[in-house]
Amino acid sequence: MPSLKVLFLTAELDPLVKIGGLGDVAGSLPAALTLLPESPDVRVALPLYPQIKLAGIKLSPVAKFSLAHNPDPLLAEVFEAKVN
């Protein structure tokens, strides 16, 4: 059986960006899921807010692509970081 893969898409992540309860859940649930016997591959995606850049987390570039948008396309960048 293939291993379970979970991707959380969130606007908040405790302790990096937290306004309310969503940040608490997004910060604790992925870590709890990794403790399951199935050992799922759990990842979290969120916008790169300025406070994340200021936190000194090592960001590694993964991809760049453009998104269709009028009148000009928007450039999007994806970064990866390992955090506890």
Image (tube, rainbow, N blue to C red):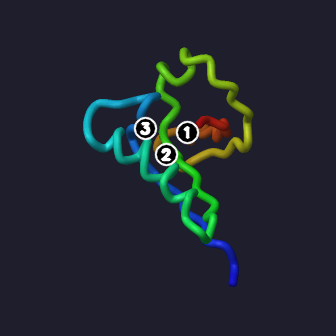
Kindly report which numbered mark, 3 or 2, lies closer to the viewer in this rendering. Answer: 3
Crowd rating for badge 3 (residues with CA inside 10 Å; few <14, some 14–19, many 20+): many
Disc 3 and disc 2: Cα gap in Å?
28 Å
Mark 3 or mark 1, earlier in chain:
3
Residue 58 or residue 3, whichever sits in front: 3
Amino acid tagged 1: Leu
Label 1 sits on residue: 74
Residue at left 63%, top 24%?
Answer: 57
Residue at left 55%, top 65%?
Answer: 36
Amino acid tagged 2: His
Q: Quadrant of residue 65?
A: top right
Kindly report which numbered mark, 3 or 1, lies closer to the viewer in this rendering. Answer: 3
Crowd rating for badge 2 (residues with CA inside 10 Å; few <14, some 14–19, many 20+): few
Question: At which x and y percent is residue 75?
Answer: 60, 37
Question: Which disc is residue 69 wearing?
Answer: 2
- Kind of element beneath mark 1: strand
Question: Which quadrant is home to the C terminus?
Answer: top right
Question: At which x and y percent is residue 43?
Answer: 58, 52
- Kind of element beneath mark 2: loop
Left or right of 13? Residue 20 is left
Q: Do the residues labelled 2 and 1 touch (CB within 8 Å)?
A: yes
Left or right of 21? Residue 15 is right
Question: Which disc is residue 45 wearing?
Answer: none
Residue 24 or residue 60, whichever sits in front: 24
Residue at left 55%, top 39%?
Answer: 74
Amino acid tagged 3: Leu
Mark 2 or mark 1, earlier in chain:
2
Q: In this view, does 2 lie above or below 22?
A: below
Residue 64 or residue 72, whichever sits in front: 64
Label 3 sits on residue: 13
